[in-house]
Image (cartoon, grey):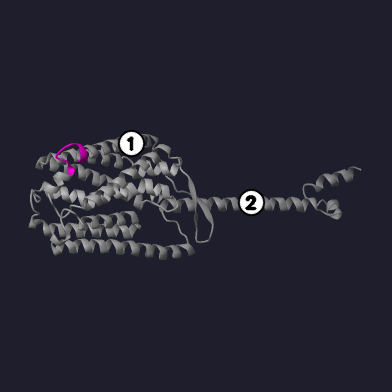
Amino acid sequence: MSDSRSVTSAGGARAPVAATPSYSTASFGRLQIFHPISLLVLVASFAITSFVVDPNLKSVSKVHLTYFNPNDTWLMGYWAVLFILQVGTALSIAIAATDHTRALLANGISMSLPIANFMLAIWAPLFIVNKIPAFIAGEVMLGIATVLLTISVMVTGVKQAYGPTWRRPVEWAMIHLPARMFLAVLLHVDIWQQGLISFGLAPEGPISSKTIWPSFIIIVSVGLATAMWTFATTDLAFGAAGIYLQLAILFSNRVKFDSRPAEVVAAHILAIVLLSVAIVASLAWRRVTSRTEGRIALPVSPHEEAALAQAELEAQAAERRARSRREEASRLREGSEATPSQLERGEGGEEAAPTRKLGSAQ
């Protein structure tokens, strides 16, 4: 189950190349079943732990302040967009019409997104228990989700067959964007906030001064890693999500801007600058390289190189067969155009022999 596209060689010849790899129908079937279920479970878990029970997610987060507490309104809007996009993901899974989309879902996104949804659904009730063992268990859930989503984003970011492209805007918005937004909020906010609480560095009350430099290191490290990935893969969604979340933390309504240590503020600003530069530099670099590749388009993977070589061999074989047919046709024409004197001497080829024999018989 794959489609094909053409690769242009240095000589200008175009050869068909299989760009969409095969996928397992069983894997795609599992995704069709589990993703909608996982999304419903996640929405129900967040709704109950946010609006039904007391204490809820907001109240517990308020008593365990860290320098990773984001602005409530900003974060709520972020999650609302993420849930809406995941509804689009479920629709894409249900009505995926092309092999490319199905391969992307089955091999690129795979079960990472549904499992991450289940992990967050389990994390929410553990968080409101407000006990260290529950926080540790919740941190494990967040860690599993982060690892799975990291693998999924890396696969869809590195493998060209699955990579996001503006030529498929719906696929980008409904499949690539939700996974990247989900991973971004885990990396920039959730896993570190939960980790500080789990290690006893965010007890009830004011923020501990012991977390200033750990927070600085974490913020700068995550910002640098995200910026490097954004530049290397031109993953604009991931970089933009990181900038949004850094701003949401910087302008938190729980930890006021003027009460933040200069080290933490500097870390946020540095992370935002790194991500912004990475986005601009990546776009500029892609524009420069696209001009270079436009002059000489070479195979971009071993698979495509092998396919191009095979196509060239087949073209050479076809050319030899055509040349052989032309030579045979030329010999037949020479025989049919023999002169009368050649016919008398028997020099007209295979067709001249019967004529000569008939003449002698007469």
The residue depicted at 22 percent of the width and 43 percent of the height is 144
Of residue 105 and residue 35, the one placed in the foreground of this image is 35
Residue 5 spot, x, y in % from top left: 49, 50
Location of residue 39 by image quarter:
top left
Task: Tell me the distance, in whole angstroms, between the alpha carbons under discs 1 and 2.
Answer: 56 Å
Q: Which residue is mark 1?
A: 36
Give the mark nearer the N terminus: 1 vs 2. 1
Say left or right for 140 vs 181. left
Secondary structure of the residue carrying tag 1 is: helix
Q: Which mark is residue 322?
A: 2
Residue 275 spot, x, y in % from top left: 28, 61
The residue depicted at 42 percent of the width and 56 percent of the height is 300
Bounds of the magenta span? Answer: 50-57
Of residue 9 and residue 65, the one placed in the foreground of this image is 65
Q: Is residue 236 visible?
A: yes
Q: Which mark is residue 157?
A: none
Query: Please, what is the three-letter code of the amino acid marked with disc 2?
Result: Ala
Query: Please, what is the three-letter code of the amino acid marked with disc 1?
Result: Pro
Residue 326 spot, x, y in % from top left: 68, 52
Q: Is residue 122 visible?
A: no
Q: Residues within 10 Å of mark 2 (few under 14, many from 20)?
A: few
Secondary structure of the residue carrying tag 2 is: helix
